[in-house]
Structure formats: C-alpha cells, structure tokens
Amino acid sequence: MRCSPDEFLALVLNPRRYAEVDDKLGRIDWVRREGNVTEFKFRSRLPGLPGPMPKVVSRMRLTPGERVDVEYAPSPHNRLSRRLSTFAASFVCRPVSDGTRVTRTIEFGFLPIVGLPVELILRRTLRSDVEREIRGAKELLERTEHSG
C-alpha cells in the first residue's frame, strides 16, 4: 500500500471508517479508545453465513508503527460468543520501498456442534472476503491521499 504503517493502522483503529471496506463489520453501536486500546460493539457478519450474528465487543490493541491485534473484549462482554467460539485477528505492517506491506490474519475456533458446518463455509468464503477488504482499504487510503 502506498501509505505508512501508521496511516494504515490509524484506519484500522477507526472501526466506523474501516467498516466502509470490511463487510464483516455490521452496524457499530459504539467505539471507545483509550491510549493504544480501542473497543467497539458491533453486529458481526461472516461471509456465507445466513442471518444476524450476535453483537460482539472487539478489543484492538495497537503496537505503534507495527501492528494491531484484535480479540473479543474481556468479560462481561461476549458471553454468548465466547461459549460458541474463539477469535483472534491481526494486521501486521512492514515498511517496504513503495509503502507498507500488510499481513492480515483471522482465526476462528468453534464448538464442535456448530464448528464443522461453519468452518466449511468460512474456508470457502473468508479468503476472498479478506482480499476484497484489503483491496478496499488500499483504495480508500490512496483515494484519501490524492484528495487531501
């Protein structure tokens, strides 16, 4: 991406703006930021899965200039989601000659009773969804750079 790691990570830490490029982020109820930690409550959408997913609260932790790590926020949030699944994600940025290389990871774990069907769907749909998300972030940042 033609931006600095800090510019990309600032986009990620703004969930309302990042939702413009990430279909997995449904309606956002609130966002709270304190230092290098951002929490936000939203309705999640997983590609290929029908119906509304439970609302979750995600916690993002910034390592300045390097990465953002995402997980479920701790209790009392996410009681239902924690019973059914585990979640971790990251955005790792590395400066390169023409900007920033971004590595995006998402890890889900599911209870066996719901896990197999959901896992099979996500194996088919998640990669292309993440690729579209990162392309969208690149376009958004580059459009902002040229218009500002």
Image: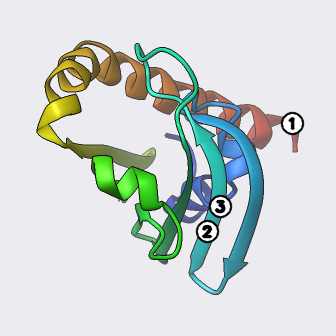
* Label 3 element class: strand
Q: Which residue is mark 2?
A: 39
* Label 2 element class: strand
* Label 1 element class: helix
> How far is mark 2 from mark 1, CA to CA?
29 Å
The tag on residue 90 is none
Q: In the figure, 93 relative to 32: above or below? A: above
Percent of width and height locating residue 49: 42, 17
Circle 3 residues within 10 Å: few <14, some 14–19, many ≥20: many
Q: Nearer the viewer, residue 92 or 22?
A: 22
Q: Amino acid at mark 1?
A: Ser
> How far is mark 1 from mark 3, CA to CA?
28 Å
Q: Nearer the viewer, residue 65 or 90?
A: 90
Circle 1 residues within 10 Å: few <14, some 14–19, many ≥20: few
Q: In the figure, 99 relative to 117: above or below? A: below
Q: Marks 3 and 1: in contact by CB < 8 Å?
A: no
Percent of width and height locating residue 139: 63, 28
Percent of width and height locating residue 10: 63, 61
Q: Quadrant of residue 109?
A: top left
Residue 91 visible? The answer is no
Q: Which residue is mark 3?
A: 40
